[in-house]
Image (spheres, rainbow, N blue to C red):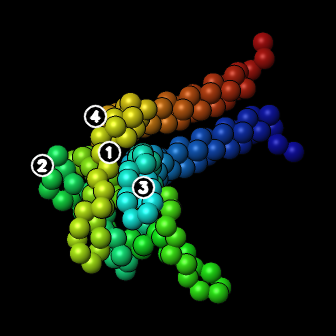
Amino acid sequence: MMSSASIREVRRVICMKTMLTVFVLCMLCLPCTAAVVNDTTKSVIVSFQYRDGTVTPAGSRVIYGYPPDNIANSDLLAELAGKSGTVIGSYGIEDPRVLYSDTGTVLESDVRFSVILPFSAAGDHVDLLDGRTRQRLATADITGAVSAFCSAHREDPDCGGGGSPLLLYGAAALIVLLVIGACAYLLMKRQKPAA
């Protein structure tokens, strides 16, 4: 049978190993958590209305996430451009008027569709072009969508923020220190002999 001193020593060793394991796991998880939190990849979604051969902008917004890869389609081209008109990126899309079914295809005359593009802080507007003739069909101003997004996400690096990773590391370090401190306190409290 073990003495009470031996039992206390076993408890102390178990507590120390537990604290060390928690500390190591927290330190290993911090970079992964920061990478997830720091992924600020955004997309611009621009909606258009195609009615009787005329295309008109129908709104835009910015969201977190990756845009689809539409490099194989070129019926229409969506060009993200800056204030000076410099093209930041050109992205092909399929003609949204073409609807596919089991019996064939139909060309609709009235459709609403969205174009999803990679976000750029320098983006000002999106030009929609005919893929064959390069004729401009419509221009959508995205500055309002970018402003609205930045108003709602001031911590985003593209909106002037950038302090969130430091806050995350600080909060995680504080939690780790509190756990270690609580374990140390409980260990010391249990080791004191009864008077």
Specify the label residue 142 is tagged with. Answer: 1
Q: Residue at x 33, y 76 (%)?
A: 74
Q: Residue 168: give x, y in percent of width and height.
A: 44, 36
Residue position marked by numbered label 2 in the rendering: 84
- Element type at marker 4? loop
Is residue 40 visible in the rendered image? The answer is: yes
Q: Measure how far apart labels 1 and 4 are at the Cα level.
A: 18 Å
Taking the image as shown, residue 9 lies to the left or right of residue 75, namely right
Amino acid identity at mark 2: Ser
Q: Residue at x 72, y 39 (%)?
A: 11
Cα–Cα gap, marks 2 and 3 = 23 Å
Q: Which residue is mark 3?
A: 48
Type of amino acid under label 3 = Phe
Q: Upstream in the sequence, badge 2 or badge 3?
A: 3
Gap between marks 3 and 1 measured at Cα: 12 Å
Upstream in sequence: badge 4 or badge 3: 3
Instruction: Please provide percent x and percent y for residue 66.
Output: 43, 59
* Other-residue count near label 2 (Cα within 10 Å), few / some / many at <14 / 14–19 / ≥20: few
Kind of residue at badge 1:
Ile
**In this rendering, which labeled residue sits more in front, label 4 or label 3?**
3
Number of marks drawn: 4
The residue shown at (14%, 56%) is 86
- In the orientation shown, which residue stands out farthest toward the right? 1
